[in-house]
Image (spheres, rainbow, N blue to C red):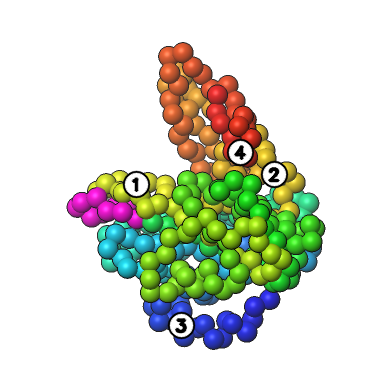
Amino acid sequence: MKTIEWVGWVAASLALAGTCGAAGGTVTDQAVSLTYGASHWSALPAANLTGVDATGDPVYQTGWWYRAEGDTREYPLPAPDVEDYSPTGRITATWNNLDGKNFRVSELTWVLDHEGPSGGFYSIVSVTNNNTTARSFTLFHFLDMDLAANSAGDSGYAQTPAFLEFSDSGLHALAYRAVYASQYQVGAHPALRDSLNDTAVTNLDGSGLPFGPGDATAAFQFGPHSLFPGSNTGLAGVSALFNPARRHVKGDRDGIGLPAVFGQTPDLSQRSYEPMRRHAGLGLTTSLPAPTATSSLAGTDDFDLDFDDEQV
């Protein structure tokens, strides 16, 4: 584990991100627990994930950075205005006016128990532009893993630009996937994280794979997206699944390792799906494109072998 660098970075975190973060908390799904540490909402987004690996906690840091139009660097999401750790296994965080830039931001994160032990988390971010004109907004998700409780033995390779896999000696695996990502990057700790915390603009470049073995970190970039005034847009989604039983699951539109429940109205005018835990839904129903006069929802599968489901 990387305990030494924590002390040296506290002062830098305060300078970069202002408040070092809210109190944090823990959510649980069966045997798996996800904890946001006291410094999670900062340039050092501490987190812990237990119950997915017999060796202990494979997550060291994970969190979100952003860059709004006019910014000359990236910023970590600061302490939220509202923060809730639900007994149903969901973290909710809301920023009503992110750093005074007239964007309302919300993060929803679920912990997932896949049994085995296996599991991880799924996180999505939505942004509302409350400015009077269109503004661009870019998101970054960062993950620092320590597979097999070892910070020096991780190897990584890409399945697709939105589906990265890592392992330690082939015994401890991570599937890190993105929804709507425009780019990824992999690098050794702490250089990739430091590039998000420095005073220059960063754009990920698809580099770093194959990686290792070494102390791996990875990130996805979402955007830049142009947001119209008043528009509420789900800009980004990621899943990090440890020791997954399968690389691909039919009906798994969000890469969480479990199928979704699909449905449509009796008049065929609307479609929807809800991602599922092993024992319950996530409580997140998403609309799908309405069927045409000559089509109906029949099912999903990975027809082009990119580890992502298409709908038919």
On the image, the x and y values in percent for residue 247 come to 69, 44
Q: Secondary structure at mark 4?
A: loop
The numbered mark at residue 306 is 4
- When the figure is inspected, residue 86 is found, relative to residue 301, above or below; the finding is below
- When the figure is inspected, residue 206 is found, relative to residue 279, above or below; the finding is below
Q: Secondary structure at mark 3?
A: helix
The numbered mark at residue 247 is 2
- When the figure is inspected, residue 39 is found, relative to residue 143, above or below; the finding is below
Q: Secondary structure at mark 2?
A: loop
Residue 258 or 157: which is nearer the viewer?
A: 157
* Residue at the spot of label 3: 12
Q: Which residue shows up at 51% across the image and 43% down it?
A: 284
On the image, the x and y values in percent for residue 286 come to 47, 38
Residue 2 or 98: which is nearer the viewer?
A: 2
Q: Earlier in the sequence, mark 1 or mark 2?
A: 1
The reply to whether the magenta stretch includes residue 90 is no
Q: Which residues are magenta?
A: 124-137
Q: Amino acid at mark 3?
A: Ala
Q: Are marks 4 and 1 in contact (CB under 8 Å)?
A: no
On the image, the x and y values in percent for residue 59 come to 64, 66
Q: Which residue shows up at 33% across the image and 51% down it?
A: 128
Q: Earlier in the sequence, mark 3 or mark 1?
A: 3
